[in-house]
Structure formats: C-alpha cells, structure tokens
Image (cartoon, rainbow, N blue to C red):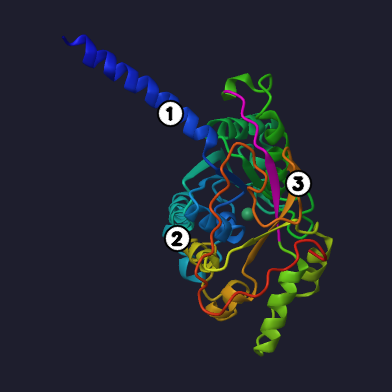
Amino acid sequence: MDAGPHRGRGRVGTGGAWLIVFLMSVRPCILTVHAHPDDEASKGAATIARYRTQGVHSVLVCCTGGEAGDILNPAMDRPDVRERLHEVRMAELARATSIIGYSEVVMLGYRDSGMPDTPENADPRSFARAPFDEAVERLVAVIRRVRPQVVVTYPSNQEGYPHPDHLQVHAITLPAFDAAGDPDAYPDAGPAWQPQKLYYTTWSRKRILAMHEKYLELGLESPFDEKWFERGVNTEPATTVIDVTGFAGVRDLALLAHETQIDPTSKFWFGLPPEVAQTIYPFDEYVLARSLVPADTPEDDLFAGVAALSAPRPLRPSPVGASAPAAPAASGTG
Ligand SMILES: [Zn+2]
C-alpha cells in the first residue's frame, strides 16, 4: 500500500504551499525604497533593527549600485577599489544590511545617475533616465512578491539634497504603491497586493537643533549650518516618531560598513561621542503620506491601524546608557 504515503506527501506539499501564502499575507512586512548603498544606513536603520526584534519581515529595495558616488574615505581611495567599485559597494551593502537586520535586499538594477550636472546624468543605464513605466513595474513586482503592509520612501520636498536618484525614488514609489493593488495594472508583475500605509523619511528641525546644541555645549564645532535649519523648516512635520532607544548604535555600525562612502573621522556622522550621539535624540521620524486604514496621528508605530495583523508586540528595549529622554510630540515644529 504505497498510495497512502504518496497521497500524504501530496497533501503536505499542497498544504505547505497554502501555508506559505497564508503566512505571507499576514506576516508584518515593511519595504523601504532607497537610492544608493548607504542610504539604508543613514535613513531609518534603527527603525528596521527595532522592528526586526518584533518579528517584522523587512525588505530593502536599493535602486542603484552607487557606482557614481565619490570615495569619501581617503583610506579607501585606492586604484584597486576604484577599479571594482560596484563590487566593493555591493559587499559593503551586504555587510550594512546584515548589521541592520534586513530580511532581504533587492537591487532594482539601475546605475547611479550621479550628482546634478555631472556627466553620469547622461548614461542611458542610469536610474534617472530609466523608462518610467519600467521602473515602476519593477517596484510593483517586488511589492506584489513580498507583500508589505508598510512602504517607506523619500519625501516630495528634497530641496536640501536634490540628487536625481533620490527624486526618482520618490517619483516611482507613489505610482507603484497605488498600482500594486490594481490587478489591471502591470498584469505581468504578479498577483495584486495593496500596501496599507506609505511613509516619507524625514529629519525634523527639532532633531537638528538638539544635535547642534549638543555640539556647542561640548565645545565642538557643529556641522549644522543655516542651510540645515532651512531644510528642517521646509520639510513636512513628522506624523510618526519611532522610539529607537537601544537601537541607535545600529546606524553608526551600518554606516561604517560603507567604508568607501563614510569617513570614520567624519565630524558630521561621528563628531559627538557615541554614548551622547545615541541618546540625544533616539527617534526616527516619518511623515505618513498615504493611508488606506484609519490613521490617528501623531502615532508611534508605522504599523498602527494596519488591518489583518495582530499588532506587533509592544517592545521596550533596554536602553543603552542613560535613560531615554521624553518622546517628542510628533506634530508641532516637526
Ligand atoms: Zn543616496
């Protein structure tokens, strides 16, 4: 009687497939869209590290390989590194995302477009020159495969750093967020899946001021000049503030993994003593740009109100060093 075992295996196989589909549709998942290797470290790394401890699946979409970025660490500015910069930056990205705790990294497959008004802008392989529908469809295909409830991208106002690739990240994410849930849009990109919330990353004026004042208090030269304060004023107020107490150090470690892009002696990134830098403002800030579920802002959780999920376990990580400062109001000056 060997029919039984065969049937049994068949049932297990089918059941397993359904179980995977079921688990994927209910597992909490966040997808972030970034332009270059290192952007995932400088924007929201601690948020991802925190959600990882709550069992959230996290997917990074990195749109370019960062091939046009300068080597900003003099110790790494060597011919052997220059010759294979793409390969080096991919290895750095793998290290950084492993430190942060990303579950998966997806390269969207475009070339770094370079800073505004540089020769790289003209490269037909560049992200900024990509056929718009093609780039949106690639992102839609990732969204439909990994099924995030929450998507994070860059804000519409990027006057402070108008890199063509950063503008393009914003430009493709909005239509991709909408199209992913529309079965008539991009039918070859997989079965429709509608994310529920879309966020922009942001740095509030409050954060910049707190850091600036700490530099001055410690008798150090502040890297934040007038332009930074104007940037802070012009950005949309944060609606959502994530307490990353205990996870703030992840950002520094992830940044340092990008050896060719981050100078470990940089006053901007590492000018404050680590124990000060990690506790002075341990919050990541976001602007809720779109929500298909009732959203009660200000909020302190990117998954707040997300339907069909048991809410992620509230987590109170053990603070590193000093006790956490009071959470800032998420509205206000932002
Ligand atoms: Zn970038």
Q: Position of residue 128 (x, y in %)?
A: 68, 41
Whichever of labels 2 and 1 marks the residue nearer the N terminus, that label is 1
What element does badge 3 sit on?
strand
Instruction: Answer with mark 3 or mark 1, whichever residue precedes in sequence.
Output: 1
The location of residue 147, given as percent across then percent down, is: 56, 35
Q: Secondary structure at mark 1?
A: helix
The residue under label 2 is 79
Front label number (2 vs 1): 1
Residue on which disc 3 sits: 289
Q: Is residue 274 magenta?
A: no
Which residue is rendered at x = 79% and y = 61% of the image?
331
* Residues at marks 2 and 1, CA–CA distance in whole angstroms: 51 Å
Identified by mark 1, the residue type is Leu
Instruction: Determine which of the numbered discs, if any, sits on residue 321 in the image.
Output: none
The residue type indicated by label 3 comes to: Ala
Q: Residues within 10 Å of mark 2 (few under 14, many from 20)?
A: few
Kindly identify which residue carries mark 1.
19
